[in-house]
Image (cartoon, helix red, strand yellow):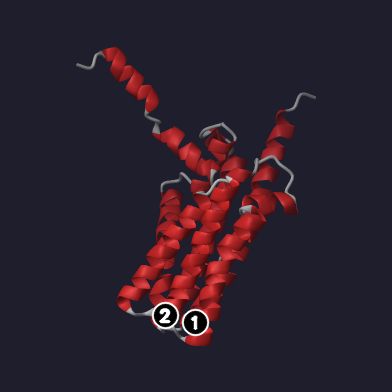
Amino acid sequence: MSGPEQQDEAADVVPTFRESFGAAVRKTGIGQVSPGEVPTAGALLAAIGGIRGLIESIVPGLGFLVIYSLTRNLLLSVLIPLALAVVFVIIRLALRSGPSQAFAGVFGIAISAALALITGKPEDNFLPGIIINCVSLTVLLLSLIIRWPLIGLIVGVLTNEGVEWRKDRAKRRVLVIATWLWVGLFALRLIVEVPLYLAHETEWLAGTKLLLGVPLYAAVLWVTWLLVRAVYARALAGAAPR
């Protein structure tokens, strides 16, 4: 039989939603930097996974584009990038350098490859990414509609201020603008990629996905970082004793 003490212990072990959300946020790119930190190229590179993370993000997609352009062989085009992703995981395991990101990459590439092979349509290799962009865009828009901008919730976790930013008009406005920036990122990807997907323009789809992937993500992350840093620095200056 489980008594009250055992139930309390179980409750302590199971993380709350806030704890789980906080842990997830800190693993994201924006979670790698402090809102008050001075933006630097090195810090931005670290936020997108460093040189190794950059290579792991770009090489599989580039491999698909090159192999498919040269051979038009769907099997090789999806399996070689998958093999490269597996190699990245093995390297991380060997170096004991946190393989979770590489594992996630393998999982995503495997799903994309399986879908393309099942349907026989090379453009379906990019369908999971399009779906992820749709879901991300929907979540961001819903957060704005209900006036709880997602970037505000993320920054609240990173600064340990919770939702206190909602009481500050300047912070709230900047965090809304920052959330709209991310809406723009996912909307732009869909505006460009969906017509190419429907037109079966696989090579153009692969190329634009690379351009609208890490480079665009890094640019939006940088601007978000600047916006949040500016408003938080102003708030800290206003709160400082004179």
Whether 147 is drawn above or below 52: the answer is above
Residue 235 appears in view: yes
Q: How many marks?
A: 2
Pick whichever, 104 or 228, lies toward us.
104
Image point (65%, 53%), residue name: 50
Label 2 with label 1: CB-CB less than 8 Å = yes
Pick whichever, 172 or 233, lies toward us.
233
Query: Residue 14: x, y in percent?
Result: 37, 29
Q: Which mark is residue 68?
A: 1
The residue pinned by badge 2 equals 74
Query: Residue 52: x, y in percent?
Result: 63, 57
Q: Residues within 10 Å of mark 1 (few under 14, many from 20)?
A: many
Q: Amino acid at mark 1?
A: Tyr
**Left or right of residue 141, residue 216 in this image:** right
**From mark 2 to mark 1, how far is it between C-alphas?**
7 Å
**Left or right of residue 57, residue 116 in this image:** left
**Left or right of residue 142, residue 40 in this image:** right
